[in-house]
Amino acid sequence: MPWLNWIEAESTAVRYFALNGTDHRNHTEQDAAIGDYIRWRNQRAKPKSGFAINPKIRHPEYPFKAA
C-alpha cells in the first residue's frame, strides 16, 4: 500500500526526475542534479494528507502485541 511508505514514492521521484535518461560525467554533476530536484520539490512541498484514515490500528480496542 503506497500510503505505508511515503519515502519510497519520494525516492522514486528523485530517480525519475534527476537520474533516469541522464549521462552525468561525474558524481559532482549527478549530486547537483539531485540537489536541484530536492530544492525544487521542497519549494513546492505540501503536508501529506489522507494518511491511513480510520485504520483499525488507531482504534483503542486494537489488540496490543508486544515482543
Image (spheres, helix red, strand yellow):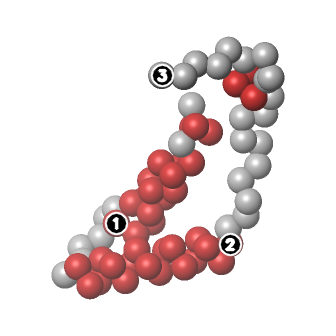
In the image, residue 64 above or below residue 27: above
Which label belongs to residue 44? 2
Question: Label 3, label 1: how many angstroms apart (C-alpha)?
Answer: 41 Å
| Location of mark 1 (residue) | 19
In the image, residue 33 above or below residue 58: below
**Residue 46 location (% of width, % of height):** 73, 64
Question: Label 2, label 3: how many angstroms apart (C-alpha)?
Answer: 41 Å
Q: In front: mark 2 or mark 3?
A: 3
Q: Nearer the viewer, residue 67 or 46?
A: 67
Location of residue 54 by image quarter:
top right
Tally the numbered discs. 3
* 11 sits to left or right of 20: right
- Which residue is depicted at the point 30% across and 70% down? 22
Q: Amino acid at mark 2?
A: Arg
In the image, residue 9 above or below residue 57: below
- Quadrant in the picture for the N terminus: top right
Number of other residues with Cα within 10 Å of mark 3, as a class: few under 14, some 14 to 19, many 20 or more:
few
